[in-house]
Amino acid sequence: MCVGFKGKDNYEIWLNAGHTGSVEDFLIWSKGERFTYEDFTVEEKAELIQPLLDAYNAEKAAREAEFA
């Protein structure tokens, strides 16, 4: 038995938003264009990398405390 929600699927919502086309057109549209690192602003790049820096610094502090 499969349980699910009744309602519109993404394609129907896309059509109701004023788009036209087939399911294939919707899938192409929803995939969007590829982007590269250079497409991001300096602020966006900083925001993307901050969690990595935070994790690195926390690990570094934990190791330093272990040997202190």
Image (cartoon, rainbow, N blue to C red):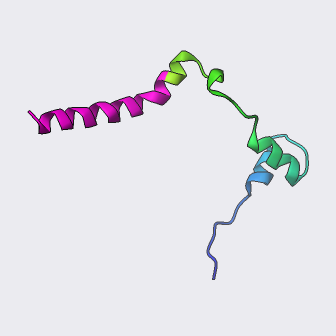
Q: Main secondary structure of the magenta part?
A: helix
Residue extending furthest bottom? 1
Residue extending furthest top? 42
- Residue 28: image quadrant is top right
- In this picture, residue 29 sits left or right of residue 66: right
The quadrant of the picture occupied by the N terminus is bottom right
Q: Which residues are magenta?
A: 46-68
- Residue 60: image quadrant is top left
Q: Find residue 63 and report its horizontal and vertical position in percent.
A: 19, 37
Pick the front one: 66 or 55: 66
Pick the front one: 20 or 37: 37
Pick the front one: 55 or 28: 55
Residue at image coords 13%, 39%: 66
- In this picture, residue 67 sits left or right of residue 3: left
- In this picture, residue 1 sits left or right of residue 9: left
Is residue 15 visible in the rendered structure shown here? no
Q: Find residue 49 and report its horizontal and vertical position in percent.
A: 46, 28
Please tell me whether residue 49 belongs to the stretch shown in magenta: yes
Using the image, determine if residue 44 lies above or below residue 68. above
Residue extending furthest right? 21
Q: Find residue 67 and report its horizontal and vertical position in percent.
A: 11, 36
Pick the front one: 22 or 18: 22
Residue at image coords 47%, 22%: 46
Using the image, determine if residue 43 lies above or below residue 1. above
Using the image, determine if residue 37 lies above or below residue 33. above
Q: Find residue 36 and report its horizontal and vertical position in percent.
A: 66, 28
- Residue 23: image quadrant is bottom right
Residue at image coords 76%, 49%: 13
